[in-house]
Every structure is written in structure tokens, then in C-alpha cells.
Amino acid sequence: MLLFERSWMNRWKSVILHEGEGNIRSVKWRGHLIAWANNMGVKIFDIISKQRITNVPRDDISLRPDMYPCSLCWKDNVTLIIGWGTSVKICSVKERHASEMRDLPSRYVEIVSQFETEFYISGLAPLCDQLVVLSYVKEISEKTEREYCARPRLDIIQPLSETCEEISSDALTVRGFQENECRDYHLEYSEGESLFYIVSPRDVVVAKERDQDDHIDWLLEKKKYEDIGLAYINHLVERGDYDIAARKCQKILGKNAALWEYEVYKFKEIGQLKAISPYLPRGDPVLKPLIYEMILHEFLESDYEGFATLIREWPGDLYNNSVIVQAVRDHLKKDSQNKTLLKTLAELYTYDKNYGNALEIYLTLRHKDVFQLIHKHNLFSSIKDKIVLLMDFDSEKAVDMLLDNEDKISIKKVVEELEDRPELQHVYLHKLFKRDHHKGQRYHEKQISLYAEYDRPNLLPFLRDSTHCPLEKALEICQQRNFVEETVYLLSRMGNSRSALKMIMEELHDVDKAIEFAKEQDDGELWEDLILYSIDKPPFITGLLNNIGTHVDPILLIHRIKEGMEIPNLRDSLVKILQDYNLQILLREGCKKILVADSLSLLKKMHRTQMKGILVDEENICESCLSPILPSDAAKPFSVVVFHCRHMFHKECLPMPSMNSAAQFCNICSAKNRGPGSAILEMKK
């Protein structure tokens, strides 16, 4: 085998690549590699290194090489496919590691797949990751049982490591196939056009890969219009039925991503991307991100609501989120207050886990999901400078959230953030006080002014419940604002009850409230002041007559009434006083009866108890000398005093009774209560 190369001055220089092994029956050259086959096997030569890098021997030496020649084809620059007899080998040329070279070629060949076929191979050609095989077929006649040449077959097979899978098989009708041999057939192919040429002695057959158009033509010929698929979609589009055409894509295109993308571009050409958008697959299959982005851009240019709907419905991983975010921001530069765009941008930020920006937009829009977003993603660190926005949006929810998460946002921080918004500061501190009267005690002085300014109805309850409120400051504020009820309470709490009562009478002119206040204080001087103030005011006298009967002797008031003064409803008031007096007498008599009955019952119970015996044995001791109460010798005389309190003494250990009282009492109990300790038993022997 000779290699001719152009040398200096355009002369041809020949180099012998191989000789001495018979005829060379096939040569294939690809890139820097040359492969040829002779009777012994297949050689591969590297043009760069000027070295032969491998020799692949022939497997079945029983087959005549001139009758069953070797078929070679390059799949790419480094992959050689060898078909010989019924054997197929796929060889990969690889670079040898520098440490392994020594005197070896810089490349070597590895057989990555090898398998056997059912028929003899006349030609090979690559088809993507599959193989097109032209096979020479011999079959045995059922009648004569003799072998004969059948029609050649064109098969598509999927190579595996040690076997193969048949994808399709077609028998070819060529003239004179009955007399042809394996060497009479050849297979050549045109790269890039998917055209395959089957050459026989009398025919050349051109084969090409079936495409969707072929299928549609066949369906049209058979009048199977419902199955036509793409042709049917085109028909609907031509009629202007864009929505129906888009809806049919779901059934017709199924899970074929390539067809989906093809149809989307067709809809784009006719300006109907919006029509197909609701029907695009969102999971199985998933199209290229560019497809979804293209449709989103289409909506963004003309339909903000439709754009927002797609963002809500489509999973965020279908498209490049950052690309869409930038597009929305560009549109907001023209229309910065568009709520639809702002809300959609917040959703995009949420998909991208940019929760801080999303939160700021939601707060600006006062969106209902803002609190859910904060809780779900624990965004409390992001809202420390947005507390005013939260409160403006929904003060009740905001306060509840802030108080529930006090460990994340301190009370001090919230109060500081609300310093310029005292009305919101009051809402927060009021709710805090309701939850706990002591947590916000450092702010109770501030709260006096806040309640006075924004929430007077709750000022008095606050003054009553707070134990940390400075009373002088509170009194000053209430007097400045002329808050009578609050001032009365504070004066009373500070011990100035007389001034409080005077204020009730002079400012409120409310005798019932004055009487109620006097009852609460239960101070005789207050009643005297109340009577003195009311004595020249008939309505006040009526009120006093109706209410003081159970607290002050009504005679004290009646004696002071001037003769001739007309008192409204005097008769009814006097009748009420008499009724109250009778009621008091009845109550006292009833209490007396109950007291006498209880005293008698208790006296009988005490008498029964005192009549009971008390056990005295060797375990008891004298409470004075702490010796056993009974002598060790029972025959000796002894004298023991036992009290009802169960304390026991030797008689000689007790002190003598005093001159004032001849009765003897327990030394231990007499200091507390002499009754139970009275002597009940004196034991002598």
C-alpha cells in the first residue's frame, strides 16, 4: 500500500505503508487516520506520527476474504466500525498516556463493542448512535431443502457492549439478487444528508431516513385525517382556529419535546405564542428554557395580567429566573407603580430565594401573604428596618407576630423603630402590656402620654393595672388634660382621698359616684365631707338618704337638713332608710341566733373531747425534765399532770400556781392559748 505526498517543488513522493500480506480490499481515510483491510486483518495508520498503531485480525478465517470482504466506515474522527463476515467490531482510537509511551505509538485502539449478526455483512454506515447494516442473506428452501440467495436486507441496529438490538429491518428487491454473492453488494452514505446508497451489479438503491413529512403524506394518502397530526394542526392554523390548534398539540405532540419546540416556533412566526402558552408541557417533557422565556417575553410586552398568571402557574425551574427578573425590572422603569408587575416581581424573587426584596415589595403593596412569607422563611432579620411598613399594613397582625417572636426582634428594637410613629408605638406597647404587665415596665412612663393622646378609654385601666407607673407623672399629665376620672383615681391611690372626693363633687357633680368612692375608702372623714358638701344641695341629699343608710347613721344627715328645705322624693328616701334599718335588725337577729347555736355546738364538742382519756405509757416523757413520765419501778408512788394539749409533766416539775390564778396551765402552751392547755388529769399512785 502506497501513500503519495506532495513534496518540494510540487513533486509527488511515495511512501510504502504496508506490503506482503496480499491484496488490499478496502481503504477508509478520516482526519489523520487511515484504515485498510487485507486478507489478514485491519490496520490503522497515524499520518501525524507516521506509525501504524494497530492490527485487528480477521476472526473467521474459514471464510474466503475475496467472497466475504471486510466493510469499513468511520463514525467520527476516532471511531472505526469493522464488519467482516458475521462479526461487527467498534474500535475507538485513544491517546496513550505519556508515561506508557516508551517506544510505543502515541495512540492505541480499544474495541468498545463486539457482537455477531445473523447474516453476512456487505456494508456498514453510521446513523447517529446506531448502525445501518447491509446484509447478504442465504436461506433454505422448505420444498427442496437447498440453500439459495435471498433478497438483501437493510437493517438499523443499536450496538451494545457484547450484543445488539434490532431497531428495524427491510428486505430490498434488486434485479438478479438470486445470483449475487456477498461481495456484489456495497453500502455507501452521504454525511449530513442521511442518504444511503445500496449498490448491486444491476441496481443502485437510494435510501433516506423517514421524517414526519413522509408520515403525514402516507396518512393523507390513506385518508386518516384524525391521525395526521402536524398536518391537521397546520390546517387549523391556516383556518385561523389558533386556540383549537394549540389545544390539539397536547394530544398530537404528546411527549415529543422536539416537535413541541418546532410547533412553538411556528406559532411565533404567525404571532400566536399566547394561544399555545396554556398548553405547553410543564413536566414531562420539559422544553428548553428559551421556549418558556420567549412566551413570557411575549406576554410581558402586551399583557401584564397574562404574564402574572403564567408566573404563578409555571414552576420556577422551567426558565432562567434572572433573565425574567431583569425583563420585569426594565418594564418597571417605565411603569414603576404597576401593581401587577410589582407583585409578579415579588413572586420571582421568592422563587429565587431573594426573600428580602420580595418582602419589601409585598409590604409596599400591602399584600396579604406578607406575614405568611415572613413565618415560612424565617425572615425576621430582614424586617428589623421594615417594622413601620408592617404596622402600616396591618398593625394587629404585625404586633402579634412581633410579640410572638420577641426572641428574634427585641422589644427595645421595635420601640426604637416606631419612635417617629407614636400612634403605632402605642398599639405595640398596649398589646405588650395586655400580654404581660411587667415586660415593658421601662416604657410605662412613656405609655401614660401615649394612652392620653391616642387611647384615653384604656388609660384608667392601665393606671389601675400597672405597678411600675410613676404616679406623680401620671397625675401631672391627667391634670394638664383635665382628665377628671383618672385624676380622682390617682389622688385616691396617692392617699389624697379628700381631694379626690372634692373633685368628684365639684367637677363631675355625680353624687352616686361620690357615695361609691366613699364606700370604697370606708373613711368617716370622707362621709363627713360628703355630707357637708351636699347639705345645701337637695338632689345630693336625696342621693345620700338613698345610699348611706348601711354605712353612716342617717340621723347625722337628717339633723343637718335646714327647716323648710324642699327635698325631692323625701318620703321615698325615708321609707327606704326605715326598710334598710329593719333589714339590718333582722340580719343582726339572724346572725345572733346562728352564733348562739354554733357556740353551744362547739361547747358540747369540747366537753366530749375533754372527757376522753389520754394514753400514758413508758414512751412518754416529762416536757420539763425530759425523763420518762412513768418510773422504772412501778411499785414506787408517782404523781403526773397531763394537759389537754397532751403535754405531760411530773407534778414536782411544774411551777406553783400564781396568786392571781389558782388554775394550773401547761407551761408550753400557756403563752399562746391557755384554753387548750388547762389541766385535765392528775395521776397519782
Image (cartoon, grey):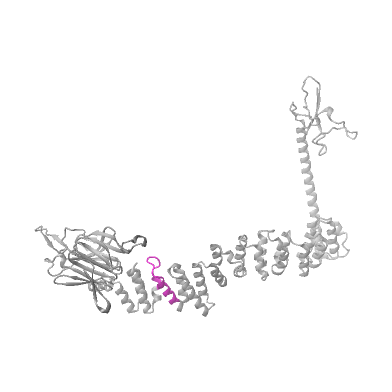
- Work out which quarter of the rendered image holds the C terminus and state it: top right
- Give the camera-side residue of 665 and 174: 174
Q: Is residue 280 magenta?
A: yes
Q: Is residue 606 visible?
A: yes
Q: In x, y percent, where is residue 313?
A: 45, 69
Which residue shows up at 9% across the image and 58% down it? 144
Relative to 274, 16 lies left or right? left
Looking at the picture, how far across and down is residue 279, in whole percent?
39, 70
Question: What type of secondary structure mainly makes up the magenta span?
Answer: helix
Report the span colored magenta: 277-299
Image quadrant in which you'd find residue 90: bottom left
The residue sitting at the top extreme is 635
Could you tell me which residue is drawn at 52 percent across and 70 percent down? 346
User: Is 111 displayed left or right of 582 in the figure?
Assistant: left
**The N terminus: image quadrant:** bottom left
Please state the horizontal and vertical placement of residue 190, each as a whole percent of the image.
25, 73
Q: Residue furthest right?
A: 659
* Relative to 11, 474 lies left or right: right
